[in-house]
Image (cartoon, rainbow, N blue to C red):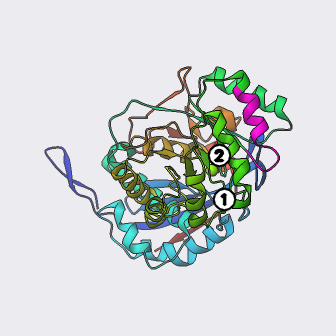
Amino acid sequence: MREVRVAGRAVSVKLRVVRIELRHLEMPLRFRFETSFGAMTEKSFLLARVFTADGATGIGECVAEVDPFYLPETNGTVAHVIKDFLAPLVFAHTFESPAETDGLFAGIRGHEMAKATLEMAIWDLFANERGESLTTTLGGEPKNTIPAGVSIGLQENAAALLERVRVEVAAGYQRIKIKIKPGRDVDLVRAIRKEFPKIRLMVDANSAYTLADADTLRAFDDFDLMMIEQPLAWNDIVEHGQLQPRLKTPICLDESITSDAAARSALSIGACRIINIKAGRVGGLLNSKRIQATCAARGVPVWCGGMLESGIGRLANVHLQTLRGFTLPGDTSASARYFEEDLIEPGVVVDSNGLIQVPKGPGLGHEIVWSRVDRATVHQEAWTT
Ligand code: OSB
Ligand code: MG
């Protein structure tokens, strides 16, 4: 059903999804991205599209990977859960608000990435149907720009890392994050600090350490880091709570925060002082808003993480960062860093001051180039009511 407008305001939008399309895409990355849990040379991911009978559409990019090395979900588990559990629930519901996926999906435990994929497509559907920017649908602030940071993977050696840092600092990025793991950590930070004493710098361990490494982690305190991201196990908030009081450097949790409840648990025991929000990891944009509000109420800064998304997920991240509380530069960088040819036109661009423009057009706000999407699609399925 089309919206009813009274004095230009949408007063009632009832949407029924009659078709869901799930594509599996493969896109070569312009660089090898190595973390403590593995290395990637291509992006292999799912895109979900929802359609109404009127032909309105919305799109959501999934952050799952081919393997369960970052978090438990994979492209395979997401496809299964969408097909067998989430799609039937969506088909049976009439939506008046994108927030309704929350109650709809509540009976399915975990599978945050699968839920987020459809949830984000439904937010985009509402934005498109109302003819407004996803920022507006989400309740973001009317910001024109958001600050950009960059995440640099593990490199061959310290010289190669320093060269990457030089390139990204020269490009204007406001914050540099480097990946670390045991044996490739404090010396790298020391080398960067020697050349760049003032840049905003942080490290991401992706769960590579244990409490027994507390002395190594404490050595980072000498380098004025903004934070250390997810040093300990992906599923151990309590041990982060034991580590944080032993460090001056704030801990930022990524993997451990898969829900607002997890954020509340972490903050209530002092397991972190900063939270990285990835909509895909926390079950979608509504939970991202909740976690942002939970953190704002406690004066805890949040920032938006990244999963090497194509332009589609990248634009959703840009809109998410218009919410109050996203005060720190995140991991959203320029499309051209990742892909020879992104799926959107124009790509996401970072200017020489390290700022990204927030699109103002309907939905995600940039054109999706379907010929490129088709070329990158290796498999596709669709279900209808
Ligand atoms: O831990 O933030 C992470 C990429 C894949 C999996 C996990 C992480 C990352 C990044 C990349 O750091 C951020 C980006 O450039 O999108
Ligand atoms: Mg991380």
Give me the disc on residue 232. Answer: 1
Q: Could you say where residue 240 lies in the image, as x and y percent from the top left?
A: 59, 60
Indicate the quadrant where residue 243 lies: bottom right
Mark drawn on residue 107: none
Left/right placement of residue 52 relative to residue 238 reads left
Q: Position of residue 338 (x, y in %)?
A: 68, 38
Question: Magenta stretch containing residue 3, yes or no?
Answer: no
- Give the residues in magenta: 180-193
Figure quadrant of residue 223? top right
Earlier sequence position, callout 1 versus callout 2: 1
Distance from disc 1 to disc 2, alpha carbons, whole Å, reads 22 Å
* Label 2 within 8 A of ligand 1 by Cβ: yes
- Which residue, given by chain and number where applicable, does mark 2 sit on? 308
Q: Quadrant of residue 208?
A: bottom right
Q: Residues within 10 Å of mark 1 (few under 14, many from 20)?
A: many
What amino acid type should be assigned to the residue bearing mark 2?
Answer: Leu
